[in-house]
Image (cartoon, rainbow, N blue to C red):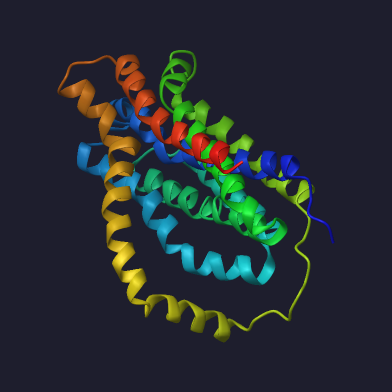
Amino acid sequence: MSAPVFFGLYLSFASAYLLSYVYRTVNAVISPELSAMLGVSASALGLLTSAYFIAFAAMQIPAGMLLDRYGRRRVEPVLLMVAGCGALAFAAAEGLLGLTLARALIGAGVSVCLMAPFKAIATWYPRERQASLAGWMMLAGGTGALLSTAPLAAALSLVSWRAIFIVLAIATFGCAFAILRNVPDAPVTAPASTWREQWLGVQRVFRSPRFWWIAPLGAVTMGSFMAIQGLWSVPWLMDVNGYSRLAAADHLLLMGVTPCFAASKTSLNRH
C-alpha cells in the first residue's frame, strides 16, 4: 500500500496537536479569572494546572501500547473525545475539585497527539523524510502555544473563559472526527504483539542506561519551560512587574515564537 498524501494527514493530526498545546498553556492567561471568580489560590492554581501534566505523563506507557496494538486511527479519536469531555467539564466546573478532575481528563485525552502522528510518519514515509515531516508537526504545536497567548487574551475581552473552553471542546470533537475520517489504517506487516511482549519491551527501555542518562535532563529542562510557559509567566508579570494581562500575554507570545521558529527552520533545512 502506498503512503497517503502527507497534507491530508498533517491537517488532521496537526489540528489535534495544536489544540493540545492550547490546553497546555491556556491556564497562564485565564489564571486571573480562575483566581477571582472561583477563589483559586496560587498553590491551588498550580495543583489544577499540574493535573494536566500528571495525567498526560501517566498515559504515555499505556497509550503507547495501545497505539502499537490498535493504531493511531482508532486510539487518538477515542482519547480526543475524552479531552473534549474534559473541556466541557472544565467549562462547567464551579470549584477546585471539578477543575482539577476536568484538567486531568484533558491531559489524558491529548496524551497521544504527538506520538500518534510520529508513529504515522515512521510507518508511512521513508527515513530520510521523517525528520522534516516531524518538524512540521512540531510547528503545529508551537502555533498552538502562540494562539494561547495574545490572541486568547484578546478573545477574553469578548467572551468568558467558559465559552472559550466550550469552543475548544467542539474543536476537539471535530479533530477526532477528522482523524477517523482522513487517516487510513496502517498496513498489517506482522502479527500483533501480545500484551506481555509489549510490556517486556517497556522494561527493556527502562533498563537502558542511556534512557536514565537522557530522562532526567529532559524532565528538568522541559519541565521548567512548561511550568513557566504554561502557568507562572503571566501571573508573575502581572503581580511583580505590574503588567496588564494583554502586555503579559504579548511577552508570552514572544516566548512561544522561538521554539516555533526553530521547528520550522529544522523542517526547511531537512528539505
Please identify the residue farthest to the left as the structure is shown.
Answer: 240
| Front-lying residue, 259 or 160 | 259
Residue at the image point whose x is 55% and y is 48% from the top: 83
Q: How many marks?
A: 0
Image quadrant of residue 9? Answer: top right
Residue at the image point whose x is 32% and y is 32% from the top: 38
Does residue 37 sit above or below 8 in this rendering? Answer: above
Does residue 70 sit above or below 4 in this rendering? Answer: below
Residue at the image point whose x is 62% and y is 59% from the top: 119
Is 260 situated left or right of 129 in this image? left
Residue at the image point whose x is 26% and y is 53% from the top: 220
User: Could one spot residue 16 in this view of the protein?
Assistant: yes
Residue 99: % across, % down = 39, 43
Residue 97: % across, % down = 35, 48
Image quadrant of residue 203? Answer: bottom left
Is 165 situated left or right of 50 in this image? right
In which quadrant will I find the C terminus? top right
User: Could one spot residue 19 in this view of the protein?
Assistant: no
Residue 23: % across, % down = 46, 39
